[in-house]
């Protein structure tokens, strides 16, 4: 037909050129994801510093290819220079509130790659269930999973996820959230959780991890040694959120300990004691750590490169928290406005889109400490039957 | 009473081992599916059954349930669903034959268990249930007819050794009873299929229990619609309100007016052919579900204008047409010629006695801008009351549709704007503000009503919103007993602005189940903890 641009020479190849090798490595926070795409007559070139950039560039290239009304594939002459604004672009999945079969996780990783996400934050265990099959402590999943035969992630499953992610330039950061959110740990690790008391007698229920026993720290040390080996990423997410002090307060041995330590009635100090020891353990394993904001808010002593994960929308407003965290010199991750499990009617993607992560009071050095953010899909009302349409 | 089973045990033995469950007791005579008077609580003592309660996964909760601790085994290789002696339905009843196979598969799966096991028959001491006999009592069972508002959906189920009996007036009650029976069959820890001895008397509280699907905002492939009909049957819904066309697209392929979908559908792939439509209607019929199509006019008709020139009102800016169109043009004879022919087709394609004619949200702006319309208003003496013009149009459509011997359902605006309605018009109340008052008004004027207002399931929100749908009491409005009887049921609506095949099923279910129980079960079935238990089990079963 008239007025149609003439077809150029057909493209037969996309040449991919990567400057630094790294095919067999794992992606990290410092990975270079930049790339250049040059499509012109007779030449299609994808240039990247690292393989990770090549992956991003391939995704973009695939988005440029169109089909006309006759079905012919075509691509416009194009020049693209691209790199991510933030190096940590994550997605949280919760496999404790509801078990997610492997295929659901792998499908999510595929869609993450379509959207250039590069961190899979695996909130793998929590109060309701413990699906992680530990080699050191097999009883944890045997007693703590919804079903120890079917609702578990074997060592092989975990490796599958890690490798599937790696091939898409996605880091897997596992979260073993303590000392709260650990009810499912109790059945498989007797003595780990704090027994709650009703007056002078144990009530039969349990609370957070018991911070006053040596056995606790031996256990935690062994578990995190395993976790640190299984998950190759430099960072581990240690949780530390929403620790309910009621059970600790009810336990006479803990009250005695508080007195001994001179903590008075400030249970935040007890929480900090536990967290500090945990951080030391994890640091000694050569790992970095990410913690939920409470750990920072309760004035725990943190290593300078601790990443603080901001999740509360208010008290204080998250912009204020971002300012506080970065002012104290810690790298920050933003999730507060991106709790995608909180569904609502209509085009709520717009509210998520309009968030400006750097919109808070602070100097450039502070803003530079924001390494990115994460969309969270908590699992209270989510399983494989509705995960994909709810998340994407 | 029920048929003797030729066993020494009989009724007395049945009563001996029974524990009553906390359900309301009503008279045990079978009833047609009309709204009932409030049931009386019997003076009989009951004790809660120990351990797992067999009715912990019944949904919706039947009107009257008695179960015992005594369990019967079912062998997938030997158990059969059959027509009982004396039933007016037999092997020629395709609807029941189909249901027998379907429910067998639901209960036992399609596993290898169907073959006889290696263990000898008679080696086990446990009591066996070898059959469920289905007995239709009415001389005209309904096997080859379509369900309608007056159909009987009542059934009586007796589960005792060695044969269970399901009695119903019509096949529709048998379908409901089969669903309930399938909910009673459970597996023990070892994989054996068991059912507790029980007796159930059941019928729906409301006769119209519907789901609205919108296939205009987003096209829904046939598969989606059929899967949804299956889910409806699990929840004893009996009306599919098919909001088939609207502003955005016209997927209905009309025989008389093929251009409507040619030009108005999203694409040639996004249509429902006559075959598709028949398939939906028959699939629904086999599940006791009526299909009420909605062809909403005069508003919500943008897509109609693509394939039918001059149907819609041209809008004006001053003296110039803007190129945009508004509602159906009510002043042209051609409009009514078209509607006469169009609704002739619809009346013959869709067998239900009712057609939904819409009539909601008519914007008057375009009419007001059009000089010819303004002229017409003057001639008719309507002044500037465009509600009168709307009613003028609506009345003519109602007359057209009546001439084809169809009843109609309309959205509440048609009533609110004072159109002249036939006495058996059904008014659908959808506006959420003060809907109880609207129900009083509609029924006060003597019209039948159905309630949709609190059940717009497209309005998603975080958390367990099923509870708020469950808590609705449809009869909580000011009115006499006579008025209350005019509320024949309700509908859970899933409007399609943000829904397509990728998310329909998890968005609609199991939230719609809450509405299903509210419309079927007795008004005092309101305990949320008990509902949560049963709904959790029901949901897993539906998966």
Image (cartoon, coloured by chain):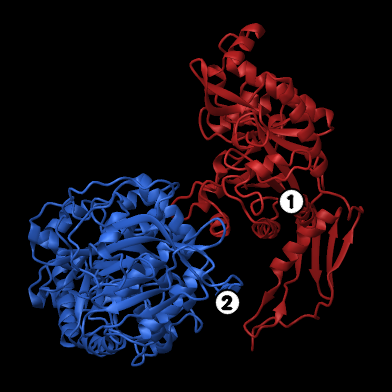
Quarter occupied by residue B335: bottom left
**Among all residues in the image, which is located at the extreme bottom?**
B256
Does residue A35 sit above or below B29 in this rendering? above
What chain letter is assigned to the residue under label 2?
A: B
Q: What crowding class fits label 2: few (fewer than 14 Cα within 10 Å), some (14-19), or many (20 or more)? A: few
- Residue A123 in the image: state x and y as whole percent: 65, 43
Alpha carbon separation for disc pair 2 and 1: 34 Å
Question: Residue at 54% across / 59% down in the picture?
Answer: A385
Q: What crowding class fits label 1: few (fewer than 14 Cα within 10 Å), some (14-19), or many (20 or more)? A: some
Query: Which image quadrant: the N terminus of chain A?
Result: bottom right
Question: Residue at 83% across / 41% down in the picture?
Answer: A229
Total marks in image: 2
The residue tagged 2 is B115
What chain letter is assigned to the residue under label 1?
A: A
Does residue A22 sit above or below B351 in this rendering? above
Query: Which image quadrant: the C terminus of chain A?
Result: bottom right
* Chain B, colour shown: blue
**Closer-to-camera residue (B204/B452):** B204
The residue tagged 1 is A154
Q: Nearer the viewer, mark 2 or mark 1?
A: 2
Does residue B427 sit above or below A176 in this rendering? below
- Residue B9 in the image: state x and y as whole percent: 31, 64
Does residue A159 sit above or below A191 in this rendering? below
* Helix, strand or loop for disc 2: loop
Question: Residue at 27% across / 47% down in the picture?
Answer: B46
* Helix, strand or loop for disc 1: loop
Report if residue B28 is visible in the image. Answer: yes
Q: Which chain is red?
A: A
């Amino acid at each position: 037909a008239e007025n149609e641009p003439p077809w150029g020479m057909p493209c037969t190849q996309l040449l991919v050129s990567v400057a630094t090798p790294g095919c067999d490595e794992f992606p990290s926070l410092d990975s270079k994801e930049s790339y250049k795409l040059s499509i012109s007559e007779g030449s299609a070139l994808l240039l990247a510093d690292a393989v990770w950039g090549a992956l991003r560039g391939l995704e973009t290239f695939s988005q440029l290819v169109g089909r006309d009304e006759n079905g012919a594939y075509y691509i416009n002459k194009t020049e693209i220079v691209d790199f991510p604004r933030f190096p940590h672009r994550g997605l949280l999945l919760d496999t404790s509130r509801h078990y997610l079969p492997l295929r659901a996780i792998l499908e999510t990783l595929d869609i993450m790659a379509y959207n250039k996400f590069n961190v899979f934050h695996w909130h793998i265990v929590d109060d309701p269930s413990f699906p992680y099959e530990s080699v050191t402590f097999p009883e944890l999943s045997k007693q703590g999973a919804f079903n120890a035969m079917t609702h578990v992630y074997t060592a092989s499953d975990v490796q599958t996820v890690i490798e599937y992610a790696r091939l898409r330039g996605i880091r897997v950061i596992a979260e073993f959230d303590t000392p709260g959110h650990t009810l499912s740990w109790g059945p498989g690790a007797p003595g780990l959780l704090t027994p709650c008391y009703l007056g002078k007698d144990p009530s039969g229920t349990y609370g957070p991890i018991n911070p006053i026993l040596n056995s606790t720290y031996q256990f935690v040390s062994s578990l995190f040694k395993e976790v640190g080996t299984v998950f190759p990423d430099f960072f581990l997410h240690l949780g530390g959120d929403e620790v309910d002090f009621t059970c600790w307060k009810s336990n006479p041995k803990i009250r005695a300990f508080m007195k001994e330590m001179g903590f008075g009635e400030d249970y935040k100090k007890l929480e900090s004691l536990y967290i500090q020891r945990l951080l030391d353990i994890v640091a000694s394993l050569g790992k970095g750590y990410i913690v939920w904001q409470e750990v920072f808010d309760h004035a725990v002593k943190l290593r300078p490169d601790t990443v603080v994960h901001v999740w509360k929308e208010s008290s204080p407003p998250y912009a204020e928290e971002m300012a506080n965290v970065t002012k104290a010199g810690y790298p920050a991750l933003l999730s507060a406005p991106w709790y995608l499990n909180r569904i609502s009617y209509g085009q709520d993607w717009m509210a998520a889109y309009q968030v400006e992560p750097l919109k808070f009071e602070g100097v450039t050095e502070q803003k530079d400490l924001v390494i990115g953010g994460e969309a969270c899909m908590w699992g209270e009302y989510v399983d494989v039957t509705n995960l994909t349409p709810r998340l994407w | 009473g029920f048929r003797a089973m030729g066993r020494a045990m009989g009724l007395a033995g049945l009563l001996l081992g029974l524990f009553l469950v906390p359900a309301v007791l009503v008279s045990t005579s079978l009833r047609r599916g009309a709204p009932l008077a409030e049931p009386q609580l019997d003076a009989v003592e009951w004790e809660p059954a120990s351990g797992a309660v067999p009715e912990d996964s019944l949904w919706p909760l039947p009107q009257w349930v008695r179960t015992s601790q005594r369990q019967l085994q079912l062998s997938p290789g030997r158990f059969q669903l059959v027509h009982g002696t004396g039933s007016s339905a037999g092997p020629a009843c395709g609807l029941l034959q189909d249901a027998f196979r379907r429910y067998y598969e639901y209960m036992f799966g399609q596993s290898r268990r169907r073959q006889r096991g290696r263990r000898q028959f008679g080696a086990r001491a446990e009591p066996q249930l070898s059959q469920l006999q289905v007995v239709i009592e009415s001389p005209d069972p309904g096997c080859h007819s379509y369900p309608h508002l007056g159909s009987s959906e009542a059934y009586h189920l007796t589960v005792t050794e060695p044969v269970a009996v399901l009695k119903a007036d019509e096949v529709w009650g048998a379908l409901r009873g089969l669903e309930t029976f399938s909910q009673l069959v459970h597996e023990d820890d070892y994989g054996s299929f068991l059912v507790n001895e029980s007796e159930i008397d059941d019928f729906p509280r409301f006769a119209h229990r519907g789901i609205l699907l919108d296939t205009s905002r987003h096209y829904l492939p046939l598969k989606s619609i059929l899967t949804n009909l299956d889910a409806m049957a699990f929840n004893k819904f009996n009306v599919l309100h098919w909001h088939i066309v609207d502003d955005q697209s016209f997927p209905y392929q009309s025989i008389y007016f093929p251009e409507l979908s040619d030009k108005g559908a999203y694409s040639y792939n996004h249509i429902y052919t006559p075959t598709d439509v028949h398939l939906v209607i028959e699939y629904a019929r086999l599940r006791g579900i009526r299909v009420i199509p909605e062809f909403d006019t005069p508003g919500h008709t943008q897509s109609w204008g693509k394939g039918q020139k001059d149907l819609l009102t041209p809008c004006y800016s001053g003296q110039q047409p803007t190129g945009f169109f508004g509602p159906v043009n009510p002043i042209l004879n051609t409009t009514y010629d078209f509607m006469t022919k169009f609704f002739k087709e619809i009346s013959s394609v869709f067998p239900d006695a009712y057609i939904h004619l819409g009539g909601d949200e008519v914007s008057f702006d375009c009419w007001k801008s059009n000089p010819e319309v303004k002229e017409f208003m003057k001639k008719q003496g309507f002044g500037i009351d465009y509600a009168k013009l709307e009613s003028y149009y609506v009345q003519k459509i109602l007359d057209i549709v009546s001439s084809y011997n169809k009843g109609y359902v309309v959205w509440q605006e048609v009533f609110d704007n004072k159109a002249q309605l036939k006495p058996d018009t059904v008014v659908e109340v959808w506006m959420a503000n003060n809907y109880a008052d609207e129900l009083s008004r509609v029924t006060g004027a003597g019209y039948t009503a159905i309630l949709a207002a609190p059940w717009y399931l497209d309005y998603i929100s975080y958390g367990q919103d099923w509870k708020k749908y469950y808590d609705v009491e449809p009869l909580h409005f000011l009115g006499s007993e006579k008025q209350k009887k005019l509320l024949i049921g309700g509908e859970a609506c899933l409007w399609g602005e943000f829904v397509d095949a990728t998310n329909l099923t998890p968005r609609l279910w199991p939230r719609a189940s809450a509405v299903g129980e509210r419309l079927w079960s007795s008004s005092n079935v309101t305990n949320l903890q008990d509902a949560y238990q049963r709904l959790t089990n029901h949901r897993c079963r539906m998966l």
